[in-house]
Image (cartoon, coloured by chain):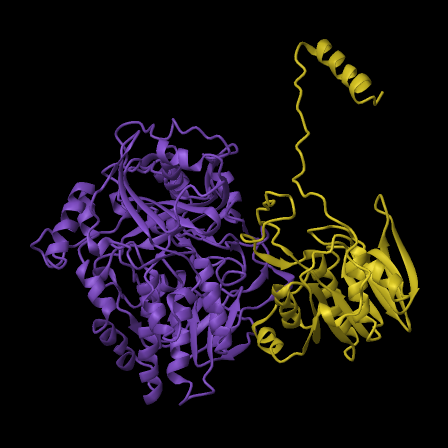
Amino acid sequence: MKICVLVKQVPNEDAVIKISPNGSGIIEDNLTFCTNEPDTYALEEALQMKETYPDSEVVVCTLGKNSASQILKEALAKGADRAIFINDNTNYNDPLSAAKVIANVLSKESFDLILSGLQSDDDGHGQTGLLIAELLNMTHASLVVGTEILDKKIRVKKELESGWFQWAEMELPASISIQSGLNKPRYASLKGIMGAKRKPMDNLERSQIEITDVDNVKLENVYLPQKSKETHYIEGDTDEIVAGIIKVLKDDIKAI
Amino acid sequence: MDNEQREILEVDFLFVGAGPASLAGALHLKSLTKEKYPDLSIAIIEKASEVGAHSLSGAVVDPISLNELFPNLSNEDFPFEHEVKKEYMYYLTKKSKLSVPFIPKPMSHHGCYIASIGKLTRWLEQKCEEAEIDIFAGFPGSDILYNENTVIGIRTGDQGIDKNGEKKPNFEPGVDIHAKVTFFGEGSRGSLTKQLINKFNLMDGKNPQNWAIGVKELWQLPEEKLPQGYVAHTLGEPLGHSLFGGGFMYSMKNNILDLGIVVGLDYKNPHIDPHHELQLLKSHPWIKNILEGAEILAYGSKTLPEGGIYSLPKLYVDGAMLIGDSAGFLNGQRLKGIHLAMKSGMLAAEAAKIALDVNDYSEIQLMNYDTIFKESWAYKELYKVRNFHQGFEKGLIYGMANAGIGLFTGGRGFGIYNKLSSDDGHIHMEKPSTSFDKYDGIEYDGKYILDKLTDVYYSATSHDEDQVAHLHVNDPSICIDKCKEEYGNPCQSFCPANVYEIVDDGEERLQINFSNCVHCKTCDIMDPYQIIDWTTPQGGDGPSWKNM
């Protein structure tokens, strides 16, 4: 099996995000970056598949600026076999553009399976893995909490609502986005880090990728969510409070 | 005992902690050995998730060690903010400030550079990578490995242990790293260094180390309110004359203001709270005015060894050497340690090269470190200020007088004594006879004057909650039975990150909010009963500082 895991570099989840004064984006100078947490579950799932099917190959791929190669090194240290680095400074505002660039690169190889995290902690589109499936003519599933490889097929357990799950059988090749928490991502070992230095990493510049019809979405403004919550105290004796609550439910939020 | 099957990684030389001392030491060792020993393996381990994420300093850097390490580069090539152009020393009263008209040359920052130690260590990391030095970030040193009384390396911390001490499914045992020589460059009050000093009595015959705590914030100013290369230090308010320390303010690139306070960890009153002192400093009208319209970017804290040359431990044992803040290479009078930390790493590297040539890594060879140090400019610099800190045990006026006389007498204490003694900082603490209201008037506004938890948020600190607390209180019954009465639980005040909290859920007890910990080590130093042991948490946990 040839498995590709898509990973993304995002600001550290404890980082304090500041917006640039002109609203063009976030200020990155004071941020530290890490692997998008949902992607670490996708990588772990791939590495466990490789443990079951040892002649599999796990390839990690990211699209990002220079520093993003760091998260590929981490993935190699954890056990991925090789990496594809698409070095691209563009901040794509829509997931389709990013998917087109990545799909173009991945189309040069024939992967049986593409795994990605459910969504990225920064943009949170949750679409890239599925768009790539469409672009590469693969089957796809999202919110996957369990996988089972069959001959030329894969069974996936999908999360539905209210605690319901669905098992589905899909043809390979497939692109699957993984729900966080389905496994415990491993740590990189010292030996793994040493070994990672000898593992191959393809470096691709954006200019080497022949895709033109991208980045058509313009970003107008970035701003922090406006605080709109308000707390009202309803005071008085019990009857007055009850009357007050009923009034709010009826007139303000029209729940009754 | 430990029944874990552990991998062993053999390297030639191992540095513990990727601060300026280790990074410079490793680079120097590489350049000393690369022709004769091209296959030599040098490794550095670091507990932070990436190099620089636990590095915090003022900082105004003397470039002397960088110039030695990179003879082909000039000061413009280093990752500095600005050259110091304007320097001021102010004495603050409650409402105004008095300018100290003349800054004596040895205390001047002329020719030095405002810098972020986080940027500097990340830059040095790049140089190490180019020199094929292995850096392992996210790996704390949790134990020292010995063969009888020879240090043979360290064990890295286990990953994936839950809060009950049980293995999680992703458990990854720590690795034993064996080395010919292990360099301890863990920074101030290193947890392994502390063990090493105790085991081998390395402080015998020395003055005890005296520490201070530095608490700082980075602020984004709305426009250029301070000139480039602006450096100001303050005395007086809010610390007054009985507390050692003072404020500092440096202008960095992109109108970022580096603002902080240093407080000596030898104060008497157990209610003293270094974080609150910084808030008081910011409440001064002059600083308030500078901060108008500014936005907080980051918060952090670290201790610093102020004791000087007489508080340096014996620097070597069989198979190991102490470098940087772990040993105490800091010039308290110049308020600088980075150049000395780097130099100490480089001097230790020279001793290691000699040991390598004769293939003997025992004390007999490593004592060359001490010999070479005594012939270096670093020794001369520290010797001149050998009695600086001791003078302040009697307060600011004594201290300044002593420092002043010291300037004219080549460092003599009060002009007469060649060596002044000192004692441990924590023993000065005593139960206050009057009530304490110094901090009652602080007006927390959530914008400029920040409470501790808000500040901790800006330190971007996190620890996996499902692990054993890395702060060990050896006898928690003392907290309620004894400390509450005797000192009023000073841990709640001296910790700048709200880690220690006395809670009452039917019964009073100490709650340790270890996930707030910014790794400053103040608790380990200042606890009056000396029962707190700071140990390393899971690798990668802690603050994620960028430009501190």
Q: Is residue B476 left or right of residue A16?
A: left
- Furthest toward the left, the residue is B416
Q: How many marks?
A: 0
Residue at 29% over, 68% down = B200
Rendered location of residue B318, percent (x, y): 32, 77
**Chain in purple on the image:** B
Rendered location of residue B161, percent (x, y): 58, 59
Give the quarter of the image for residue A154: bottom right
Query: Color used for chain A?
Result: yellow
Rendered location of residue B536, percent (x, y): 47, 59
Q: Is residue B508 visible?
A: no
Rendered location of residue B287, percent (x, y): 38, 36
Q: Compare residues B487 and B103 and report the one nearer the observer.
A: B103
Q: Is residue B230 left or right of residue A192?
A: left
Give the position of the N terminus of chain A as an image quadrant: bottom right
- Residue A250 vertical placement versus B251 (above, below): above
Q: Compare residues A256 and B385 and report the one nearer the observer.
A: B385
Give the position of the C terminus of chain A as an image quadrant: top right
Residue at 67% over, 79% down = A200
Q: Is residue B168 visible?
A: yes
Residue at 40% over, 81% down = B31
Q: Compare residues B487 and B234 and report the one nearer the observer.
A: B234
